[in-house]
Image: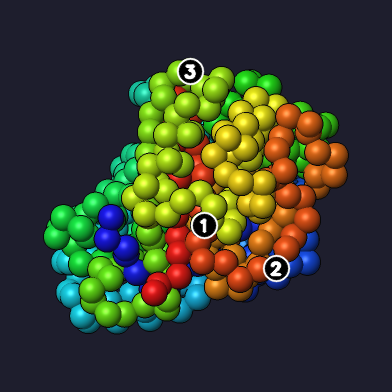
């Protein structure tokens, strides 16, 4: 594929708002996880909750979109000079030539949950939603994409990708196709997911949530820690001549459709996605300097992903899961961990795997627990979702 320039990138997680907060947290090995304090009757577990979301006030013209998910989307949108860089792209191409491609797993379902929990009874006995939640646009899967388009004033193609935990990785592939097909000159991609009852109790019903902080690839791991996050990247045609030296070089997608919530036992879909990403980037596995693993800390996911990585990559690869810092941010995991891969390229910061100390014998030498520093040319990100929705991305330095 033709590379696509990355002009800006940002993430807001439990580590804080913006790239500097992510960098500092990764370097200091400071986790954003904390005991669960979300909801009326919090589950006994740990979560990655973003501070300050409840204090966000949307501008008056966006009041119809008011909900927790869009508040986090707005907070993340203000970081790392993204609005200023976006204005420059619009000046070059026009707002109609900039696509919006957003990934989310649950969109604004938390607001829908609240609306039904607070139903009001009319005089005739019928029920209605509380007045502040009678906003149809927040009760749809496209709430996030619709909100971001309204918040930015962009009016190119607008797409919401909802493929569970691979959602905001797949936005890069979708945007690259739009740009390479000539349907857009640039694209604002990203993802946002916030904590809500459906997510917390849904994963708990599958017996996938750990009682303490998650321990990816550790022999003692018992489950995941859920988190919330928002992030964006601004992509542009490489021949436009702009950029900060970082590029999307390849992507790979697959749908193994093995099981609704369990990975393929041999990791078939995961391997196909990684191989396709490497092929599109035109590089051998040995060229990859850092791989951000999906690494959710569930027993099955980690061992299967590690076996595929061991079969594809040489022992010298530095591969890790960063979910011990942020929690598993579901539909936002792809964008957050792509930002971490981009930090590996720009800063040489190769994160380890937080909270993990005892290597699982089933995992190969590629799985690293300690941070490292190295100048690398290519970094990858894996994101795998329920139902076998897999995506792998290759990022690199231009030139």
* Of marks 2 and 1, the one in the foreground: 1
Q: Is residue 83 visible?
A: no
Disc 2/disc 3 C-alpha distance (Å): 38 Å
* Residue 241, image quadrant: bottom left
- Which residue appears farthest toward the right when viewing the image? 358
Circle 2 SS class: strand
Q: Position of residue 268 (x, y in %)?
A: 47, 26
Query: Mark 2 or 3 closer to N-term?
Result: 3
Q: Position of residue 144 (x, y in %)?
A: 37, 50
Q: Which mark is residue 354?
A: none
* Of marks 2 and 3, the one in the foreground: 2
Residue at image location 54% in from the left, 39% down from the top: 312
Circle 1 SS class: helix
Disc 2/disc 1 C-alpha distance (Å): 16 Å
Q: Is residue 326 above or below residue 140?
A: below
Query: Mark 2 or 1 closer to N-term?
Result: 1
Q: Is residue 250 visible?
A: yes
Pick the front one: 104 or 178:
178
């Amino acid at each position: 594929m033709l590379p696509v320039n990355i002009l800006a990138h940002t993430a807001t997680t439990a580590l804080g708002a913006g790239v500097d907060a992510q960098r500092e947290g990764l370097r200091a090995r400071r986790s954003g996880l904390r005991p669960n304090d979300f909801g009326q009757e919090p589950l006994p577990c740990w979560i990655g909750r973003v501070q300050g979301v409840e204090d966000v006030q949307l501008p008056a013209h966006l009041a119809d979109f008011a909900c927790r998910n869009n508040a986090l989307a707005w907070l993340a949108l203000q970081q790392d000079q993204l609005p200023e860089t976006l204005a420059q792209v619009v000046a070059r191409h026009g707002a109609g030539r900039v696509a919006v491609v957003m990934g989310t797993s649950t969109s604004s379902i938390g607001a829908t949950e609240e609306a039904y929990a607070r139903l009001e009874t009319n005089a005739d006995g019928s029920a209605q939603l509380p007045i502040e939640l009678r906003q149809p646009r927040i009760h749809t899967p496209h709430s996030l994409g619709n909100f971001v388009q309204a918040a930015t004033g962009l009016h190119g193609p607008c797409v919401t990708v909802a493929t569970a935990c691979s959602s905001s990785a797949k936005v890069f592939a979708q945007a690259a196709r739009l740009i390479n097909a000539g349907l857009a000159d640039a694209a604002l991609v990203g993802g946002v997911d916030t904590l809500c009852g459906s997510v917390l109790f849904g994963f708990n019903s599958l017996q996938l949530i750990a009682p303490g902080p998650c321990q990816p690839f550790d022999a003692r791991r018992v489950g995941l820690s859920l988190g919330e996050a928002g992030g964006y990247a601004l992509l542009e045609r490489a021949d436009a001549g702009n950029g900060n030296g970082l590029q999307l070089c390849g992507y790979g997608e697959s749908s193994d459709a093995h099981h609704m919530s369990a990975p393929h036992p041999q990791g078939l879909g995961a391997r196909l996605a990684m191989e396709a990403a490497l092929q599109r980037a035109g590089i051998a596995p040995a060229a990859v300097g850092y791989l951000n693993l999906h690494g959710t800390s569930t027993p099955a996911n980690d061992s299967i992903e590690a076996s595929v990585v061991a079969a594809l990559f040489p022992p010298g690869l530095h591969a890790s899961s960063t979910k011990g810092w942020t929690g598993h941010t579901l539909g936002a995991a792809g964008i957050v961990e792509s930002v971490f891969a981009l930090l590996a390229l720009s800063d040489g910061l190769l994160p380890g795997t937080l909270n993990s100390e005892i290597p699982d014998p089933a995992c190969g030498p590629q799985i690293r627990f300690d941070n490292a520093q190295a100048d690398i040319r290519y970094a990858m990100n894996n994101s795998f979702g329920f139902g076998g929705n897999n995506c792998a991305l290759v990022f690199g330095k231009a030139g």
